[in-house]
Amino acid sequence: MNKSNKILKDSAAVRWLVLVLVSSLMFATYYFQDFFSPLRELMETDLGINSEEFGRVIGLTTIANMFGMIIIGGIILDKWGIRLAGLAFGGLATLGGIITALASMGYFGDDKSSVLAGLIVGRILFGSGLEVVCVVVTRTIVKWFKGYELALAMAINMGFGRLGSALAIAISLDIAGVTVSPAVVFAATLIGLSLIFFVVYLFFDIKMDKQIKAIKAAGQVKGEEAIIAGVEQEEEADEDFKFSDLIKLATNKSFIYIALLCVAFYSAVFPFIQYAPDLLVNKFGFSYVLPDSATVVAFGSEALGSSLVFVVIFIFALSVTLIPNSLKGKSAKRLSVLIIVGVFAVVVYLVRDTLGVWLVNGPKTASLIPLGTIIFTPIFGSYVDKKGKAASLMILGALLLIFAHLSLSVFQSPFLAYMGLLSLGIAFSLVPAAMWPSVAKIVAENRLGTAYASMFTVQNWGLGAFFWGIGALLYKVNPQVVQAISEMRESLLAQGLTSGEVADKIKLLQLEGSLPYYDYTWPILMLVACGVISIFLAFKLKQADKEQGYGLELPSGQKPE
Ligand SMILES: N[C@@H](Cc1c[nH]cn1)C(=O)NCC(=O)O
């Protein structure tokens, strides 16, 4: 390439800096999406918001997307471009964050209904920006990484999102303390900061566009330079959203099955994560606060032992997948797995007290689900690239999902709970790694934008229903718990205790056994149905692929004969 024709994206340092700047939006929006998860109980004791209302706040976050916001956002992105669309939808998400934070601080009124209404309005605005922001970020990455490390950049970008989710679940309660609002203010600040990062990115975007324009104007764009420099315009022209494309997609059997699988699978994962810390506390006796080692021992040796076995199995799974097959011979691989697991088992034994403290804490343990996917999704992604088997892996993912929700609902054993969380984490890595590249095989490249937008739209129907549905069912099947907590809260407030003191006291009374815990059996059992539907759809997808010949079971780049 002619040196004078070099543009900003040809510099690796600038490319990766751009990735960090734009992926911060992904990090912050995923963080904001999930930070309420460990606050479920505190919302009830501090603000009087019960589980149904909690579900409403989370569920209504998706409402604009249920009614076409992602498609509208995609059309706006095509018309306005990355810069304006990013600012508009990032700004909308930030505004939503600010309103949610102000509501939690009682700015719109201290009474429950004002707080609840403010939270809902804030979350609706946030949700209206959320998905489109993710689309803008993805487009930006394509703009900067096409012809370079596109797949890796996309995986890292997704990693930023998952890290946001994991941190949100792990630390929000520590930030909140005894009242909800500090955690909301912190989460809203993160979105604001990421928007500032996006504004910094705009300088790079403007400069690169000017470079491309200058190269074109000078008539120097030939051959390879033409492809690199001109790529944005071609893509924008090709990838515009068209309703005729939507009709074509809606009549494609394989696309219908994969879109419905996306709804069923994600409905059993994202909504579950919103309630996972509270489930672990209420059903399995995990703690909300980090307990001291003595309390952990009192929690029971079975749970402590199980959590340590969980870590060792996690390390085993990790080393089996991470150690390359290229390592000479099966026995060499087995030996290295054994050595790694042995060394880690000793380390786990030595730090068992600290680890035990973390692994009996509901939010910290639940945060391992998105955290684990950061490592496992790229590994499974590379497996799908090299070996194929995408449809079969989706069947396996659905099977693991059923096992996970069964062990977390009908059984009471902490060991099974850890195994359930582990298999949910593997399913949550496996299915996205197999699903998203499969869409690209089923749908022509110039219709991919429309395909993802329509899939995310129907996905939000499921998410909205289950975000709310789990909380509503929890409320419905636990009338005595709702009443006991509400009466206790009223009586403690009447005695002049602050809301923070009320939250602490209620937690203590539950620990002592004077106040009951929520029964999560039915709300989680409901998710088993999503697993069963997922497995059926994954089988139908495999069958349809055999008829239509998209090659979902083949490695990347290979087509059926
Ligand atoms: N449509 C998104 C959902 C989401 C989650 N948080 C913000 N948006 C999606 O499904 N992304 C793919 C994934 O696996 O996270």
Image (cartoon, grey):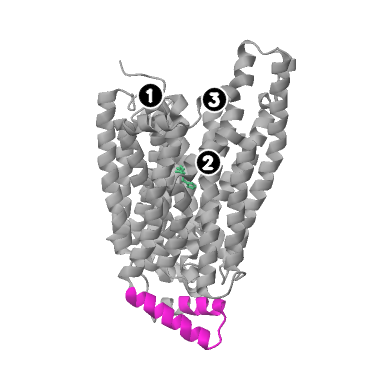
In whole angstroms, how far apart are the C-alphas of marks 1 and 2? 33 Å
Front-most of residues 368 and 517? 517
Mark 1 or 2: in front is: 2
Region of the chain picked out in magenta, as a range: 479-507
Q: Position of residue 437 (x, y in %)?
A: 42, 31
Reading the image, the residue beneath label 2 is: 73
| Secondary structure found at label 1 | loop
Front-most of residues 535 and 242? 242
Write the residue at 56% across / 44% down: 26
Mark 3 or 1: in front is: 3
Q: Is residue 492 magenta?
A: yes
Quadrant showing the C terminus: top left
Q: Earlier in the sequence, mark 1 or mark 2?
A: 2
Left-right relation of 537 to 495: left
Q: Looking at the picture, which amino acid does disc 1 mark?
A: Pro
Mark 2 close to ligand 1, CB under 8 Å = no
Q: Quadrant of residue 258?
A: top left
